[in-house]
Image (cartoon, rainbow, N blue to C red):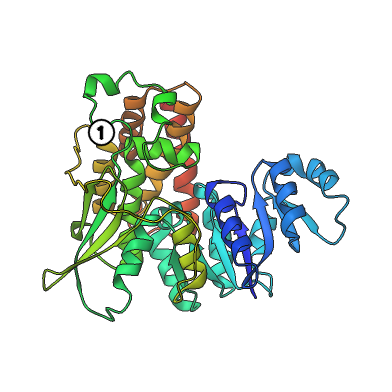
Amino acid sequence: MKQIAILGSTGSIGTQALEVIEEHSDLYEVYCLTANNKVELLAQQAHKFKPAAVVIANEARYEELKQLMSDMPDVKVYAGARALDEIVEAGPIDMVLTAMVGFAGLSPTIHAIKAHKTICLANKETLVVAGELICKLALENRSSILPVDSEHSAIFQSLVGEDNNPIDKILLTASGGPFRLKSMEEIAHVTKADALRHPTWDMGAKITIDSASMMNKGFEVIEAKWLFGVEATQIQVLVHPQSIVHSAVQFQDGSVKAQLGVPDMRLPIQYAFSFPQRLPLSGQRLDLFKQPLEFFEPDLNKFRCLAMAYEAIRQGGNMPCIVNAANEIVNRAFLEDRCGFLQMGDIIAQTMQRATFAKAPTYEDYLNSDAEARRIATELL
């Protein structure tokens, strides 16, 4: 039985991971569940899956969680960022699913890598912020990183069996979000309710807004660069509204391999858990007779966040970290009606210009860059 720690068990990825574990309860067992604020759901999950420990990141909710878990004395209850870092180092854990959202996922991922755990990576910000550092640590500690994002899982699946055959190009697909066909004038007046209506995927609020602005796709470009050892110029974004082709790889002979399927995050989650095996998975099956497959070039003028992500890669150093921090601030502001949709891009661009640039950042530099960029973006708001 593989022992799995789920960082962010109450979010979209975390809850679907628990569905996979429940469907294959003969293979997987939950060792630890963590959440940021959702104590009630965390307690419900703990009562169902009976982990060894639960962690609530927000220390202010610790007593509340303790009370909810008082009838389960065998389950250890912890709180705070340090507890997250320590729990992933526990000896029995085989795999750590990093499904936390944002910069907060970086530190526990580093601790899990140093503890030689297999990382099932759903927290894209980890590689966006500190890709070079994470890849170096994974190599030093012989810790495998298995992608959980549907796009990166598709690329990974397309590369299985290819040994060291060089990648000519990665074809990274994007749904285009809810505003693909809208004009700039229309986009200027969209609301958070408009942005939260994603046409094909059911995700958390933060990622849904990032998808609408295409910043999410920009982050995935950065993530793909580090995961698959390619240059950003080898990664082409294709707008594919049907979300059936999850991504593809073109090789030097011109051949293209792709992974297709219905939009269901349980599939890449399960593949990361079971790799290299494929296990049965309940659910809908793809019917290619029912719809066409369309592909379009993204409009970088309309979706400037994607262009800024490419620029961040070009500059390198701590610039992706700066972009991520500014984006987390404006994303939250948009969800709280304190910022317009197009204004998010304006503030990120200004933060990129004002923040201190470091060409060869250390871990401490990343922490400082994150704090500085958040401060600048908040002031600009």
In the picture of the structure, the residue carrying the numbered disc 1 is: 180
- Image coords of residue 328 (percent x, y): 46, 38
Q: Is residue 294 visible?
A: yes
Amino acid beneath label 1: Arg
Q: Is residue 274 above or below residue 176?
A: below
Residue 226 coordinates in the image, percent (x, y): 34, 63
Q: Residue at x 49, y 67 (%)?
A: 280
What is the residue that sits farthest to the front in this orientation?
289
Does 134 sit above or below residue 355? below
Q: Nearer the viewer, residue 208 or 37?
A: 208
Q: What is the residue that sits farthest to the bottom in this orientation?
A: 163
Specify whether 76 is left or right of 232: right
Q: Quadrant of the N terminus?
A: bottom right
Residue 252 sits in quarter: bottom left
Question: Looking at the picture, how far across and down is residue 173, in whole percent?
Answer: 27, 51
Left or right of 161 in this view: 48? right
Could you say which is closer to the camera, residue 141 or residue 285?
285
